Image (cartoon, helix red, strand yellow):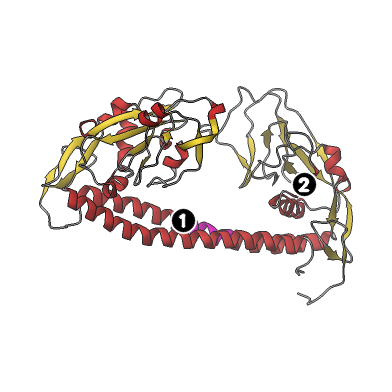
Amino acid sequence: MRMSREMKDSGIEWIGEIPDEWSVIPQKHLMYKKKDICSTYEGQDILSLTRQGVIVRDLENPSGKMPTTFDGYQHLEPGNLLMCLFDIDVTPRCIGLIKHNGLTSPAYSQFVLKQGCLPEFYNYYLHMIDNDKVYLHLSRNLRNSLTETDFGFIKALKPSIEEQSSIVTYLDRKVAQIDYIIAQTKQSIEEYKKYKQSLITEVVTKGLDPNVKMKDSGIEWIGEIPEHWDVNKLGYLGSLQNGISIGGDSFGEGHPFVSYSDVYRNIQLPDSVVGLVQSNTKEQVNYSVQEGDVFFTRTSETIEEVGFACTCFNTIESAVFAGFLIRFRQYRDKISKFYSKYYFRSDMHRKFFVKEMNLVTRASLSQGLLKKLPVLVPPYEEQEAIGNYLDEVCSHIDNAIEKKQNIITELESYKKSLIYEVVTGKKEVS
């Protein structure tokens, strides 16, 4: 690597200086749009533009929306670029390198690189642009779109074909190394999360004393429990209440509103929620949010998001809670909030819900089913000891996870910076 090279102003605000020998030309001189429509679908692979690149969709186990037919989709060819030139502001990834033959929606734009332009280099270059959504301020209309003409007139860089090749070789190697470390770190985080869940399940079903005498709980997926613990149905311990149903124009001002995401994302309800809704005194009584209440997610598109629980530690005055939630409130103060936040959030209940739940178009948890949920009830003092123990241990696990997530954030930032430095010629590679 040479220590310095002659640089010049590119004339492009978001790029700055570039090597003196590089060209700056409109993108229409680098690539052209190609659209080859398939009138009748004949079983070709269906390709999708994702954060992971242009991938082959799994039609046997599809995720996301599926059209009624693939007739009218467009042919894609390896070595071309696939771009999303609409909804630039909300599309997670607007550029990808096509590596397989297949079909995709005609709404996307396929570009063929001209002679002297490597698709792999311009994939990195346009990724750099997309990372900061640079083209967003050039887009038009409510869909934040660019026309083919708009895109073609935007100026871009053109190094020599030899330097493009060197840059691709360098970035392929460096990005692969960074992505490997990120993948390993993510795997480590998942292992921590699994360990945390297994620890919670173990402690809320077996207690803290490894020498305690055990008995059969009578529940297949729980097994043995300490002999002195009680087993009750949730419906025996308290009442259940579905949340409030209010029109959309009532939100944004008024009194505190506990939302679906407040419960889904938290094991312990925040003392102050961000949602506001217009509610009257009667509604605030019927749908109140009090210390010790446990809220369950009631309905969702998928069964994986139903039955998540969140415990309220401090009463939220004048608050109401969402209709997609069910509130459990104890008849008597028999379950400590320190214990309930872990017991009800344990993933062992997933087995119960999945086995018993009826799926129609949406997954839905009924009060009738929730009433049947088995609840293990240790002595109150033991519940608090279990909660305090799990608070301490889970805090250490969460801190370890946070450190690893920070590492991922730093690596992602470094990768973006590296791509920018290299594809704009500020960092020279050989």
Q: Is residue 72 left or right of residue 270?
A: right
Specify few, some or many for label 2: CA neighbours under 10 Å numbering under 14, 14-19, or 20 or more.
some
Kind of residue at badge 1: Gln
> Looking at the picture, how far across and down is residue 256, in whole percent?
46, 38
Q: Residues within 10 Å of mark 1 (few under 14, many from 20)?
A: few
Q: Position of residue 266 (x, y in %)?
A: 41, 46
Residue 168 in the image, given as x and y percentages of width and height: 73, 59
Q: In the image, is residue 312 above or below residue 417?
A: above
Residue at the spot of label 1: 187
Circle on res. 23? none
Q: Secondary structure at mark 2?
A: helix
Q: Is residue 302 above or below residue 266?
A: above
Q: Earlier in the sequence, mark 2 or mark 1?
A: 2
Q: Nearer the viewer, residue 335 or 136?
A: 335
Q: Which residue is tagged 2?
A: 135
Picture residue at 72% right of the left edge, 32% below the top: 107
Q: Is residue 269 magenta?
A: no
184 within the magenta span: yes
The one of 272 and 88 positioned closer to us in this rendering: 272
- Closer-to-camera residue (93/171): 93
**Which residue sits at x=24%, y=49%?**
204
User: Is 417 on the left or on the right of 299, as rendered?
Assistant: right
Q: Which residues are magenta?
A: 179-188
